[in-house]
Image (cartoon, rainbow, N blue to C red):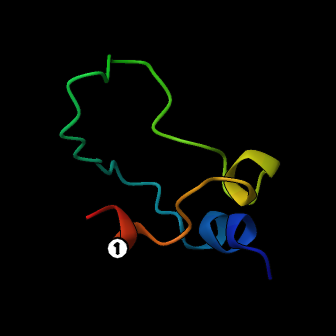
Amino acid sequence: MNVKDENEQTSSPQHSYCFRADDNYKIGDSLGFELDSEQARSAEIQNPLEDV
């Protein structure tokens, strides 16, 4: 199963929130690349721990 399908199956109808401590983020902007998209697969950082 790909990541996008798995995420859709486990999604909850309840509201959820994403904290983003990024000065460049503006309400309504994308939070990142679509899961399993070509952009996501070619991203420089594939493991979030590499960015910490």
Q: Quadrant of residue 42?
A: bottom right
Residue 1 image offset from top left, x and y in percent: 80, 83
Q: What residue appears at the point 70 percent right and 63 percent down from the top-left corner? A: 4
Q: How many marks?
A: 1
Residue 39 versus residue 42 in the image, above or below: above
Amino acid bearing label 1:
Leu
| Foreground pick, 45 / 13 | 45
Residue 46 versus residue 43 in the image, above or below: below
The image quadrant where one finds the C terminus is: bottom left
| Foreground pick, 10 / 51 | 51
Q: What residue appears at the point 66 percent right and 46 percent down from the top-left corner? A: 34
Q: Quadrant of residue 22?
A: top left
Residue 32 image offset from top left, x and y in percent: 52, 41
Q: What residue appears at the point 55 percent right and 73 percent down from the top-left corner? A: 10
Residue 5 image offset from top left, x and y in percent: 74, 68
Drawn side of residue 10 relative to residue 49, left or right:
right
Q: What residue appears at the point 45 percent right and 21 percent down from the top-left corner? A: 29
Identify the residue under disc 1. 49
Which secondary structure, mark 1? Answer: helix
